[in-house]
Image (cartoon, grey):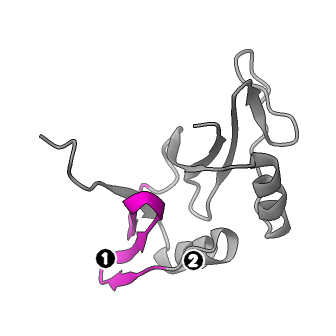
Amino acid sequence: MFDERLATIMLPASDVERARHWYEEKLGLVPNETAAAGFAYQLGGGARMFLYRSDFAGTAKHTLISFACPDIKADVAELRERGVIFIEYDLPQLKTLDGVADFGAIKNAWTKDSEGNILGFVQGM
C-alpha cells in the first residue's frame, strides 16, 4: 500500500535556525521550502527531509538519516574541512579508523548535527 508513496525524513531540532545553518554550512543542503514549523529539503533520488522544532532533538541513540557516498574517505575528508567531527567507535562489533568503519564492501561513518542527531554516511549501499 505505501511502497509507492513518497516518504519524508523528519529530523528534530531544538533550534531550527541553528540546524538550518549547520546543514547548509556543513552538508551544502539548502531548504527548498520554509514553513512555520520548520524547513523542507528535497534530496537526491526523490527523498525529502523536514527539519522541525522539538524538545526531543538529539535524544535518539541511533542513526536518523544516512547519506550514500561514492568515496567515503573523500567525503569524510571534505566534511572535516568544513568542521564536521566524526564519531569514533571502539566496540567489539564496531570499530572505526579515522572515522570510518570498514565492513568489507560496506563502509560507514557517523557524525552528530548541531542538534545531537546522529547522521550516517555509507559507501557500498
Task: Please tell me which residue is depicted at 67% across the width and 77% down the height of the picture.
Answer: 25
> Is 21 drawn above or below residue 71 in the view shown?
below
The structure residue drawn at horizontal position 81% and vertical position 48%, both measured from the top left corner, is 73
Asked if residue 37 is among those painted magenta in the image, a careful observer would answer yes
Mark 2 Cα shell of 10 Å, populated few (<14), some (14-19), many (≥20): some
Q: Counting residues from the N terminus, which is met first, the one under dot 2 or under dot 1?
A: 2
Question: Disc 1 residue type?
Answer: Ala
Per the image, label 1 sits on a secondary structure element best described as loop
- Residue 87 located left or right of residue 68: right
Which residue sits at x=78%, y=54%? Answer: 76
- Looking at this view, is 1 or 15 the one in front? 1
Q: Position of residue 80 (x, y in %)?
A: 82, 61
Residue 90 lies in quadrant: top right
The answer to whether residue 18 is above or below residue 112 is: below
Residue ranking furthest to the left: 1
Q: Which amino acid does label 2 sit on?
A: Arg
Q: Provide the residue designation for mark 2.
A: 18
Q: Where residue 48 sits in the image (x, y, percent)?
A: 38, 63
Q: Do the residues labelled 2 and 1 touch (CB within 8 Å)?
A: no
Give the vertical position of 123 relative to 93 (above or below): below
Reading the image, the residue beneath label 1 is: 37
Q: Is residue 8 visible?
A: yes
Q: In which quarter of the image is residue 49?
A: bottom left
When the figure is inspected, residue 125 is found, relative to residue 75, above or below; the finding is above
**Secondary element at image label 2:** helix
Magenta part of the chain: 31-56
Pick the residue in front: 70 or 34. 70
